[in-house]
Each structure stands twice: as structure tokens, then as C-alpha cells.
Image: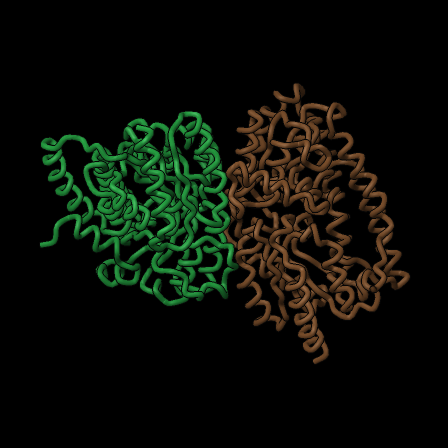
Amino acid sequence: MVSAPERFKRVSGMKTEELLREFTGRKAAGVFSAYVPFEIYHSAGYHPVYLFTWGCDSGLAAEYLPGFCCFPGRNLVEHALAGELSRLSCIVFSATCDTVQSIYDILKVILPDIPVHYLKIPALLSREIAMEYLEAEIDQLIRKSGNIEKISLRRSISLYNEKRRLTARLNRIAWEITPTDYYAIIKAGMILPVEEYNLTLSSFLREIEELNKKVSPSSSIRLVIAGSHFGEENIFRIIEESGMLVVGEFLDGLTLFRRGEVDEENEPLSALARFIFNQVATATKVNFCNRREDYLVDLVREGEADGVILLRRKFCDPYGFDAVLLTTRLEEEGVPYLIIEVDEPGYSGQIKTRVEAFLEMLEIGR
Amino acid sequence: MKNYPRLRCLKSLSKMMDDYYALRSGENTERPVAYVTSGAPVEILEALGITTIYPENYGALCGARRASTPLCEIAESKGYPDDLCSYAKGHLAASMKPEKAPLGGLPPPDFLLCCNNICQTVVKWYQALSDYYGCPLFIVDVPFLNPKEKPEPVYLYLKSQFEELVPEIERIAQTRLNREYLSEVIYLSGQALSLWTEIRSMGRFKPSPVNVPDLFMAMAPIVVMRGKNQAVSFYSEMLDELKRRVTNGTAAVPGERFRLLWDNIAIWPQLLPLYRLFAERDGCFVVDTYTNSWSMNFGSEDDPFEGMAKVYSKAFINLDFQTRLEIIKCLARDYEVTGVVMHANRSCKPFSLCQPLLHRLLNKDLGLPCLILEADMSDTRAFNVNATKERLSAFMEIVEIISES
């Protein structure tokens, strides 16, 4: 029997096509952007799978996209053109940035046999009229995904809430596990069937928490990792090789699995809309009541982090602006940070050198 | 070099725009001042007596004066990445260092009105401005529209936002909105939009009395003066001049042989030199997609907010790709276009990311030759003159061969 970390690592290292072959029992819904409530597709009988980037540019997408499209967009189009998404029963986007909107348009043309859904998320997530609109949008999405009984949606909400509780427990002890294990567990959570994930993570957490009582806190440098698009395993590996710990993440894509739960007592549709509004917005949205820079600073304090590594995706406008917003606040708070610009994934010696230099600076600062 | 007959009305436009910016400089500026995005429902502000300023228009001005790149470099030195929108970077830098910016920068705003029917980047840009100036930011959120799906929820959502916006602006303006006056402003705005639509349709004539660079130069009032009399009188004058050109058989590009369609925002620093290269090969841009964004009609809704909701949600770039493709195909047929030039604008992803697909489909469905030029609307670093000249020559040869066959 494989251990929980091995299972998570194996799954998180699989490309979408391999994953879909492994989970043939259910139709699969590929989710590309933040804000798509997995619960909806789960209750409609789908296995929702986040479409992480995989591999490097092969040049296939160059005929469909200009060079200044971000890597996740190019990568998804490449997989679509290579036929690697053909096992998906549908693909779901949520309105986040201009690139996601364009990729949605392109996929509708190049994958005419696969339904492509689009959830319009309001740009300003702190006003009631936007929430009413979002409720109507979620209702539309539910209709597109199939006939869903309320009781089934409630059951799915409950399962994903369990996942949120487990993720919160994981985040509290993130520093007790290696950064690459942490990465694999989080990523697997966006891929594995929720039932299996909850079971595996739950037993894994029990083991770690029991172990925790016996170990004293590590003296390693502690980091929060923030920025655009979760999916950069190499950064976690470099952090691990440098002997540092990740005590928290604030990365795009994981928005709906970071904070709080969907109210199970409330009517599911408005509960889902309210839940989305209560989240710390991605950089693509504005929430005057719940600012991103405040959340990041809280994360640093709660995790007693020594610094922040900020990933900035090349050709990503929202996170380009966001980086200035976040770093301005970090500077005010005296929190050291390192910005790493990422494009195609790959183990980079240059990034390793910069991370190590950052480590030295943090050590001197202690 | 071929003689390019300039439109006489552009001289009065130049004076009009000088006056416009003179009234928006230093102490001459009547307050309250709002920074507004180009596709915002400005009629509400106009009816409440707000002085509006359009940072995008200022971005175009900086681009045309080749002042954008040094400003972008200032913003980059403050942490903004080099691949961000050059209008946003240029304007943020002009706010931070007005002494280094054309016109000495723009007067600081009292509030900001951002409407995301043109892109999502404006939301982040205006958020950065709000933080910088410490002033209120109002967002009019226009969801992406596929007219084939039921658009009513989008209209309703927008209408509710207008209703919510009014008391906020009333508080700043310290006056109440007069709905009758709002209707008058909307009427004027509608007149300008109708005239603009008619002006653009003049490109259907053979030879065309208008070339797209003329439209790019003449579009400022439709962006910054909607709801004002000046816009209506300027476009009336322009339409009359174009009609006279048609009567006299005057071509915008003498010896017009090739009728081209331009897609995307202009390359402002290269506006006339670039189009001259096409004109020298007898190519006239008879139509474009960018200025099409203001070819709209307010309709005859009883409720002004309902009419505005319909107009502002249908901004060209807020429509899904299939709808845009159909519009472009209609334009290509109606204007008897023989070739398409697309500006792959590094600063404008909603306009640019689908262009290679558009290229394929226009080629496949209409047999149209297409050229994609990679550049930027205002940052000169993204434009290679020599490479462009070479590609342009090769493209025009293809257009010629296809047109003759």
C-alpha cells in the first residue's frame, strides 16, 4: 500500500490525460480558473479536475496565440490541440482576466465537441447587487451542468467543506512537512476525487499531528509563497533544497479552498455566492472589504514567516499590478520579499541562486 | 512620396482638443474631476457637471508624441513589469512624475469611474490610481456578453449599478441628478454616436473618402466629449466634408486599389508613417474594428439607464469571439475589403489574443489575406520599423496577386 505523500506526489505529477485515464469511472469536468465551485460539477456526477500546466511549450499553440500570452493559457491551448483534453466531458472557466476570456473563446472553436462553460464572476466582490447577479450566474451554470437535485448539491457542499477543514488543518502544520510534500498535497486536492482526497489527507494529518507533539519547532527560515497561478513545483523544490520551510500559500487557483466554508444551513445557491464573496479575492478582482495585502500580512504574522516569495507570471496583467500593491504593503510592514518572474516551468539555476541569496539575507536579518 | 490629402476638419479638431486639455490643466480645472475609462457611462457624470478626464486618451496622446516609452520606464523602475499595458504604465508614471509627462501630467482626480467593458486591466490600473491618489473608485462592472445567450440579466445588473452609482456621484457633485437633463445629455451622446457611425460608413464608397488613420485622429471627441455639443458639431462638419469628397470623387488614398481592414488600436507613435507605407502601395484602410466600438445606438428606451445598459454592454471588445468574428466578416463584405492587417498589440490582450484564430478563419471562410504586425499602441520598444516594412511589402504583393486573380 502506498503512503499518503506518495499517493499525493504520484497524482500531482501526472499529466491531465494520464489522470483522466486513471479515473475512468466518472465523466470529468476540467476546471481552468479560480472561482468555479467544484461542488456543482460533483453533484452533477462529474469528477472536477483542475487543469494545471504540464510540460513546456512545443510551439503548437503559436499558431493560435501571440507570444505575449501567459504560459498557462498557451499550455492549455497546446493540450487541447494535441488532443489531450478529449476525455473531458466539459471544460469550465470563470471570468477572471482577459486571457482566460480569450482562451475560453479559442477552446470553443478548437474543441467543438466538448461543452465549454463560463461562469461570470463580478469584478467587484463587495456589493450586494453583484452577489444577486452571481447567484443568477451560478444558477445558469447549474442548469448547464445537468439536472442537480438540491439534496445532492448539499451533499457535495458538505464533502468540499470537509476538504476545506482538512486544508485548514494542513495549512496550520505546513511547516512540519517538506515544501514539495506540501505542494503535492495541495495540488492533489484539486485533482483527486474529493472522497478519496478527504480520506487520505485525514489519515495523513492524524499521523503528522500525533508526530507533532513530539517534535520541537524547526529553526529553519520560514516563508510564505504568494502570487500568480499555483503550479510551480520547481519553486517549492528550490525552497526545500535551500533548507527553508513554506508556512503558507497565497497563490491563484486555490481561492475557494483557503478560507471558511459554504454555509450548509442556507439555500445552496446563495450560500455558494456568499462564500465566493467572503473569500480573499484573486488579483483579478477587487474587494474593498477584504483586501489582499491585509491577508498576506496576516498570513506572514500567523505563520511567523521571515519573508515572502512572490511569483509573478510573465504576461499576467492582474498579478503584475498586484505585485506592486503587495510589495508596497510588505515594505511598510518591514517584511522582506523576493519577486520571481515565472514563465515556462523548469528548474532554473538562476532562480536557485536568487532564492539562496534571499535565504542568506533572511538569515542575517534574524 | 504620394500626396496624402488631409481632412480640413482635423485642423479644427486640433484646436478643440487643445482647448479641451487647457480646461483640464492646473487651476483652470473645474472641480470635481473624475478620471474615466473610455467605455464608461459618462452621461451620468456629464449630467451632474463633473469634469471628466480620460487617461486612455492621454495614453494615446503620449504615444503619438513618442513620450510613452520614457514614462513606461519610470513605472517599471517602480516595480511595474515591462509586459504590462503601456497606457496604464505611462499614465501611472505621469501621475508620479508629472514634470516628465506631456502637458505636465493631468490634474489629480477627486474620484475615479472605471468600466471594465473594454478590458479587465483597467480595473487594476484604476485600483492603483485609487491607492495612489487616495480617492474613491467606482466600478461599473460589465460582464462579458454573448448576445446569443440571454443578455437580460446583464442589462438588469448594469441598470442596478447605475442606480447605485448616481447617489454616490451626487454626493461628490453636491447636486441632484436632473433626469430630464440626463435625457438631453443622452440625446446628444446618441447624436454623436449616430454621426460617428455614418462617418465610418463612408468607407463603403469607392474610392473611400476616408482612411482609418483619419478616423483614429478624429475619434477623440467620441471618446472624451460624448454628451457635449462640441462632439456633435465636429462630427457634422466631418461628415459634410466626407460627403463633399464623395461628390467630387476625392479619394483618401489617391489611386486606391486595395481596400484594407485594420484590427485593433492604432500604433500611435507610427500612425502616419505606417499608413503612408500602405498608401504608397495604393492601400486604403476603409474600415477598422477599434473605432467600431463607438458605432452604437441608444435606441428609444423610456428608461435612460436601460438604453445605457444595452449600449455599454455591447462594446465590441466585450463581445464573445464568435460575435466579433461575424461583425468583422460583415464589415469585410460590406466594405469590399481585399486584405486584413491585425495589430498584435502587446498592451491589449482582449483585442489581440484571438487574432491568430481570426486570421485562420478569415482566410478560410472569406479567402482574405491577413497580416499580423506585432507592436504596441504606445511603447516604441515593441515596434521594429525595418521588419515591419519587409513584412508589409510581402503582404501587399499577396494582396495584389489575390485581388487580380
Looking at this rendering, what residue extends furthest in the bottom direction? B405
- Colour of chain B as rendered: brown
Point out residue A223 in the picture as x, y percentages from the top left corner: 30, 36
Which colour is chain A painted? green
Indicate whether B146 appears above or below B285: above
* Residue in the foreground of this view, choosing between B160 and A335: A335
Residue B236: x and y, percent? 83, 46
Residue B298 in sight here: no
Image quadrant assignment for residue A80: bottom left
Residue farthest right in this picture = B248
Quarter of the figure with residue A116:
bottom left
Residue A87 location, quadrant: bottom left
Left or right, B91 with respect to B282, comes to: left
B88 and A154: which is toward the camera: B88
> In front: A210, or B261?
A210
Q: Is residue A316 above or below residue A115?
A: above
Quarter of the image with the C terminus of chain A is: top left
Which percent across, then down, holds residue A231? 34, 49
Colour scheme shown: by chain
Please indicate, yes or no, whether residue A356 appears anywhere in the rendered image. Answer: yes
B247 displayed left or right of A273: right
- On screen, A44 above or below A135? below
Q: Nearer the viewer, residue A42 or B382?
A: B382
